[in-house]
Image: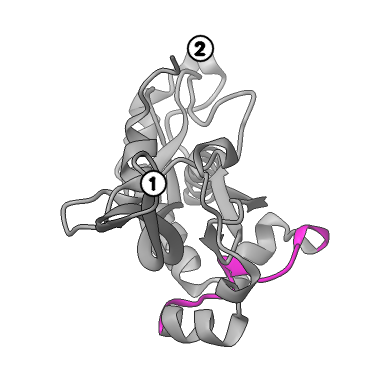
Amino acid sequence: MPQYNPDVHLIRSKPSNQARPYSLSLSPDDYHYSPKPKHLRTPRLMKMLGSSFDPFWMSLEDPRRRNTSLEELGTLSEDLAERTARFKKKLLQEAQGLALPELLTSEDGVPHNLSQAVKHRLQQWLVDTATCHLTSSWVDVGPVFWPRWIRHTDCEPTQAGCSWPPGMTCQHAQVTHIKLLAWHCWASKEEAIGPRKPLQQCTWRQIPYPVVAACKCSCQ
């Protein structure tokens, strides 16, 4: 007997206000009632999604050939750019508050009477080292979600870490939610076809879907 999966139960349950739709399983094997072509008419689904459709985060067709670079993420999404700028501003404020002459001894080969230019360069280096960027890739989330192509963001991996001295890494700092349509099916209690074959009712339902909006340098 297969192991009970709470995500599968949620998928096949009748939608309710208490449901946690962002915990839906993305495995196609967990869905036995996929939408038919008549349920995938773009004009109707676009109307259902309404203003929640965001071409930065979602695509109707395979967009993997047009993956964007790190620099383009900020220009394509004003929200991501603003979040990154806020974290970088906070890092700069913290770096400016450091007493660098007291932290650096003569043994480091750095004189105590640091010039303003040297202080600025050290502060900027600390900020650049601790600034965490986002990576971007397109993922096919399957036929029971619409649109089925979603941009996944994550923290850019850095082998040397993001702190000095080393020890800290880039971690998720903020998660935001976009809206998708999910195909929900449940057994109707009103009618049944045969003694063990309940009639299935299905509908599209708008759900929140989590995406990483910002990363920061922190301990694991």
Please name whichever residue, 182 or 187, is drawn nearer the observer in this view of the structure: 187
* Residue at 34% from the left image edge and 41% from the top image edge: 195
Kindly indicate the quadrant of the structure image that contains residue 55.
bottom right
Magenta span contains residue 140: no
Residue 88: x %, y % from top left: 43, 54
The answer to whether residue 114 is above or below residue 198 is above
Q: Which mark is residue 58?
A: none
Describe residue 12's horizontal placement relative to residue 135 as left or right.
left
Describe residue 151's horizontal placement relative to residue 8 as left or right.
right
- The disc labelled 2 sits on which kind of residue? Glu
* Residue at 53% from the left image edge and 17% from the top image edge: 108
Describe the element under mark 1 as helix, strand or loop. loop
Q: Magenta residues?
A: 51-65
Q: Which mark is residue 194?
A: 1
Please name whichever residue, 57 or 190, is drawn nearer the observer in this view of the structure: 190
* Residue at 49% from the left image edge and 77% from the top image edge: 53
- The disc labelled 1 sits on which kind of residue? Gly
Residue that label 2 marks: 107
Residue 70: x %, y % from top left: 67, 55
Residue 146: x %, y % from top left: 54, 65
